[in-house]
Structure formats: C-alpha cells, structure tokens
Image (cartoon, grey):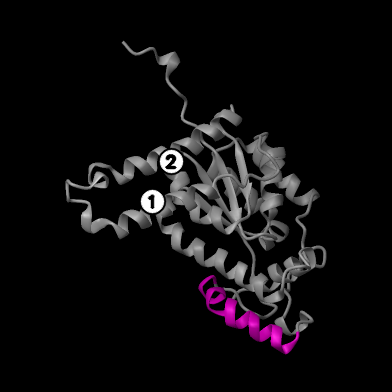
Amino acid sequence: MEDRSERKTEKKPIFVIGSARSGTSIISKAIKLGAGIYGYNEGHLLPIVAVLVKEIEKEYEKKKHILDKKGYMIAHTNQKEIEERIINVFKDVCEGIYKDEVWIDKTPDLGMIAATPYILRAWPQSKLIFAKRRGVECIISRTRKFQNVSFENHCKFWKQCMEEWLKVRESLKGHYIEIDQREISLNPEKVAKEIGNLLKIEEEKIKRIKEVFVNQRPEFTGGTEKTEAIEIKETGWTDEQIEIFRKHCGEVSEKFGYSETSDYYM
C-alpha cells in the first residue's frame, strides 16, 4: 500500500512576466511582502526551456518524413517523452532551490513569455501574472533606464513581448491574469483583489498587497501616475521617432486597445 507521507507535493509556483518597465518589480514585491511568498529578485533560468524544446520541435518537424521508417533510430523515439525529460530537468533544478510549495519567479523577458506553455507542463497548478503597459509610457521609461539601447530596439522589444503574449495566452486559460501598471497606481485595491483571487489567498494578505502598492509605488515615468495619460506628441520624441514607434508598435497597440492620446485606451 502506498505511503501517503512519501507522495511528492505538487508545487504551485507564481510567475510574473512581461516586458521590462511594465510593473513586474512592484507586482512581485507586493506578493513577496504582502503574501509572504519567497522568491529571488529575478529568475532568468526558465527561458532556456523554450529554447531547447523549440529546437526539439523544429528537428522533429524537419525529420517527420523518416519518423515511420524503422531503419532510422529517431523513428524509435518519442518526441513528447524527450521534451518532458528536458522540462523535468529544469523542474527538478527549481524545486531543488525552492523548497516551499509556493514560490515566485519574476523574469521580465521575451523568452520567459515564450516558455510559459512549457512551464505549465512542468507545473500544472502554476499561476501567471502578465504585467503590461502602454507602449508610449513603457518606451519612455525604457529609454531613460537603458540609455545604451537604441529607440528603435526598445520599440521592437516591447512589440515582441506583447505579440508573444498574444500567441501563448490562449493555451494558458484559467492560469493567468493581466495587470496594467497604470492600474496599480490608480486602482490598487482592485488589482490586489485580482491577484488575491488568482492565488486564492486570505483577505489579510490581499490588504497587505494593496498597502505595498499604495506605499511603494512602481517606477512610474514622471512620478505618480495621473488620470490623464501622456499624449504621443507630448513625449518629446522627434517626428522620426514617432514614425518608428508607429511602425513597430502601432498594430499590437491596437490589439491591446491602447491609444496614443491622454485617454490611454482607445
């Protein structure tokens, strides 16, 4: 008869993802301080999972014409089994570091967004918080923080993160919420409740998360967030920069309902 005490407890990690300068830091900090959940400042390990598994997928797709030919060794292998072994290597590494049932990982990175379907295979009970921010404010903030990166590359990176999220989120239903950084400042109680509902935590912890949002503001561009957003013409960008922004970010901005006006949303 199976000894129940030796059953492995299924971990329930929390992943905070999104483009840099979109609120990932304040969200993860609020969960750590408010809910008492441990995590490092940032993760950056799990994007490697997507790199490896996507390569396996590509190779098997390229060789699909020989997968039914018994004279080839690859025909005697199971793609999904190999993928699961790779995924479980990273699962074991993480669970060797994090001993608790629940832990938090913040990785503001394109690769991490791409890795989320594989992460869900590793931890079926995991939860994800996608931090987002309108391109205008995000790119203003990125250019101030990372001055060695070109304006165009900042635009490309924001676009790539947002587009990648649109690709993967359908496969993550029931496991995620989206939080706009602007809402943390304007509606901290509402955002705290959304996080609490996702994580199924006690009311007292939700209140503490709200207090972190109120007392430790995210790194907003230009200070405290105002009801009126920044008009694109008021950003100080040149006409050429506005054209670059629209070229890379215009289409995906519309998909998220973002405007270029002081209304923030369309």
In the image, is 90 to the left or to the right of 66?
A: right
Rendered position, 159 above or below 95: below
Q: Nearer the viewer, residue 107 or 4?
A: 107
Q: What amino acid is at disc 2?
A: Ile
Mark 2 touches mark 1? (CB < 8 Å): yes
Q: Residue 15: in sight, yes or no?
A: yes
Query: Among all residues in the image, which is located at the extreme right?
Result: 223
From the top left corner, tell me how far across and down residue 169 is, in percent.
46, 58
From the top left corner, tell me how far across and down residue 60 is, in percent.
32, 54
Q: Which mark is residue 56?
A: 1
Residue at 51 percent across and 61 percent down: it is 165
From the top left corner, tell me how far across and down residue 68 is, in percent.
18, 51
Q: Secondary structure at mark 1?
A: helix
Residue at 28 percent across and 43 percent down: it is 78
In the image, is 92 to the left or to the right of 189?
A: left
- Is residue 254 found inside the magenta-colored segment of the image? yes
Residue at 59 percent across and 74 percent down: it is 258
- Is residue 230 found inside the magenta-colored segment of the image? no
Q: Earlier in the sequence, mark 2 or mark 1?
A: 1
Residues in magenta, as a range = 238-256
Q: Nearer the viewer, residue 151 or 57?
A: 57
In the image, is 190 to the left or to the right of 80?
A: right
Disc 2 packing (10 Å; few <14; some 14–19; many ≥20): some
Q: Nearer the viewer, residue 204 or 131?
A: 131
Quarter of the C terminus within the rendering:
bottom right
Query: Among all residues in the image, which is located at the extreme front?
Result: 71
Task: Report which residue position mark 2 lands on.
Answer: 86
